[in-house]
Image (tube, rainbow, N blue to C red):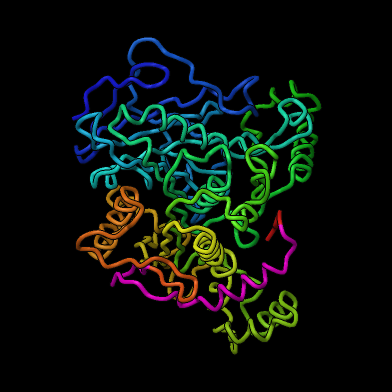
Amino acid sequence: MLAEPVHVEGGLITGTNSTDGKSRVFKGIPFAAPPVGNLRWKAPQPVVPWSGVKACDHYGPACMQPKLADDQIMRLLSFSEGRAECGQSEDCLYLNVWTPAKEASEKLPVILWFYGGAHRVGAGSHPISEGDGVAAKGAIVVTFNYRLGALGFMAHPLLTAESGASGNYGIMDGIAALKWIKNNIASFGGDPNNVTIFGQSAGAADVNTMMAAPAARGLFHRAIGSAGQRLNGGNGGVQWTRAQGEAQGAKLMEDLGAKTLDEMRAIPPEKMYGGRGLWQVIVDGNVLREAVQATFAKSQQAKVPLMTGFNAQEASPYAIADIQTAESFVAFAQNTFGDKAPEFLKLYPARSDAEALDLSYKVARDRHFGWGPWKWAKLHTETSSAPTFMWFFNQQPPIPASLKLKEAMPPGGYGAFHGSELWYWFGTQGGKNWAWTDTDRKVSDAMTSYLVNFARAGDPNGDALPRWPRFEPKDSRAMVFTQTIDNAPLANKQMMEFFDAYYQNRPAGVASH
């Protein structure tokens, strides 16, 4: 097993054995100075050194965030369902490492995880992303906390005057974690020249952003994004101008009664949440010089291998409630798509209320969750020679009825809902006392193998696995993860193309959905 203590920036650390005994785990490693006091709303600063040997045997605090209600399905993926013993704090810049290396010289591939949660909730300590299962197959897993809410994404005219730009602090935290990996991961048996960034939902949008951000260039070598993006449309496609971001921040500070930087930095961190959908990436001239899609269109993104995909029932907790009758569905089509409404209704023929109910979930999936990964794959294929791979996840996890979730259950159940793929990518089903089946375990075993293969070589294929072909826009072939794992053309390719044309008619550059 890896010799300890391990030397990292800041000092010496020790870890513990993983649950399966196959890896060493180091939890709560500081990767930047605590972003408190005068460092609130500043780029991450160097780690504060410690004396002696630091026992990294428990997770660091999660960033301050609202607690979600017990009956929300999103709670399953938030800190509310996570490690309560970690607590929450503005002092949150900690990361965790799972390494199967026996020697520091092994040069194993590294995977850095970006959690989702609308930049409002989430933590690197969530049980769904524990690295035991992936590490056991030969990759080092790193999870980290980034700043959330106003602490992580607020812009303000006074902050811009102070530093030349403001907002995007959570994105800068991700870049700082990548720099920490570059400088320290070799001590854990990792290869700093073989780093994969992997995110879901808002985390996938951050991965998409990293591919366009100049400051992240060269710090990672492969990218994976699940059901998220930062392009000109769909769910997550919002990027504010600096003026828009500053206006939102000024309104929040006005509401909180703060007029100076000192007053702003004295506000208790638990008041820094802000409303849902408020915290967007900003084209600030610093982290981002232009909208992400513009960078891809110019073929100026990071030319790294890419995997991306989405789930069959992404929108099952997030239906468009006012289009669930045939009459309202047709009215929605006419009001939203104008002269393209007949084309839309041919793709989504809601001839009865029952069909409208079913299609309301499919429209929300395709428009808000499916188009983005498809467009990301399409753009990257068209503007780079890097291999691109797409998946379609359709395995329903066994959510127990006892959860009594408030979200209206679609016909047929929640299915493969937004975020449910993560128990399979990480192989963390054992941590939940649900009725997992042999099929669930088979699908997860294949997915973790594909993941480690991709991290190792930029290609998910390997011995004894069904072949995963490269993505080509003309047929949009994807790997389908369900009871029978195989590749097939996306069944909703025509829908993707419809929404692509719809979004293309919007003004170029900074987008909203």
Q: Residue at x 74, y 83 (%)?
A: 339
Q: Is 290 covered by the magenta stretch?
A: no
Q: Which residues make up the magenta segment?
A: 479-508
Q: Position of residue 322 (x, y in %)?
A: 66, 72
Depth check: 332 or 299 in front? 299
Q: Is residue 236 visible?
A: no
Q: Residue at x 44, y 25 (%)?
A: 30
Q: Identify the image quadrant of the N terminus.
A: top left
Q: Position of residue 348 (x, y in %)?
A: 58, 82
Q: Is 506 covered by the magenta stretch?
A: yes
Q: Position of residue 395 (x, y in %)?
A: 36, 66
Q: Is residue 23 visible?
A: yes
Q: Residue at x 54, y 79 (%)?
A: 494
Q: Residue furthest bottom?
A: 351
Quadrant assignment, res 510: bottom right
Q: Identify the image quadrant of the C terminus.
A: bottom right
Quadrant assignment, res 2: top left
